[in-house]
Image (cartoon, rainbow, N blue to C red):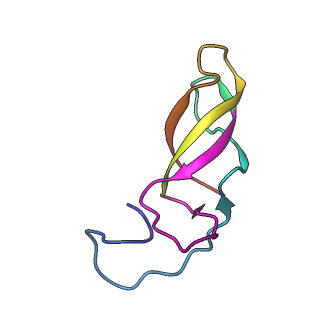
Amino acid sequence: MSKRGPGGSSGNKFRMSLGLPVVVTVNCADNTGAKNLNIISVKGIKDRLNHLPSACVGDMVMATVKKGKPDHRKKVLPAVVVRQ
């Protein structure tokens, strides 16, 4: 579940810093063969004009594989941020 926006759970949540803006390169933490991912967009973000959309833990992003297996490279793939 995303830390922002309408959610199914109730109660107070701690605010998490949005530490991963667009065009940042992150390490991939699964066993698909991808090493580095480049974040190109964050799903569900409606931001102000000229503000970079940013992601935090639990957000779904669209990313491209920059380093890894050749069959995964140069494709736009969905990903979920698990740590920052």
Front-lying residue, 6 or 75: 75
Q: Quadrant of residue 32?
A: top right
Q: Residue at x 48, y 58 (%)?
A: 58
Q: Residue at x 64, y 69 (%)?
A: 50
Up the image or down, 19 lies above or below 23; here it is below
- Residue 63: percent from the left, percent from the top? 58, 40
Position of the N terminus, as image quadrant, is: bottom left
Residue at the extreme top of the image, as rendered: 71
Would you say 78 lies left or right of 84 here?
left
Front-lying residue, 78 or 11: 78
Would you say 59 lies left or right of 27 here?
left
- Residue 49: percent from the left, percent from the top? 57, 72
Position of the C terminus, as image quadrant, is: bottom right
Count of numbered labels shown in the rendering: 0
Q: Residue at x 47, y 63 (%)?
A: 45
- Residue 9: percent from the left, percent from the top? 28, 72
Name the main secondary structure of what is drawn in magenta. Answer: loop
Up the image or down, 39 lies above or below 83; here it is above
Q: Please tell me whether residue 38 belongs to the stretch shown in magenta.
A: yes
Q: Please tell me whether residue 50 belongs to the stretch shown in magenta.
A: yes
Q: Quadrant of residue 57?
A: bottom right
Mark yes or no: residue 77 visible.
yes
Q: Which residues are magenta?
A: 36-58
Front-lying residue, 80 or 74: 74
Up the image or down, 59 lies above or below 35; here it is below
Residue at the extreme left of the image, as rendered: 8
- Residue 20: percent from the left, percent from the top? 66, 59
Residue at the extreme bottom of the image, as rendered: 12
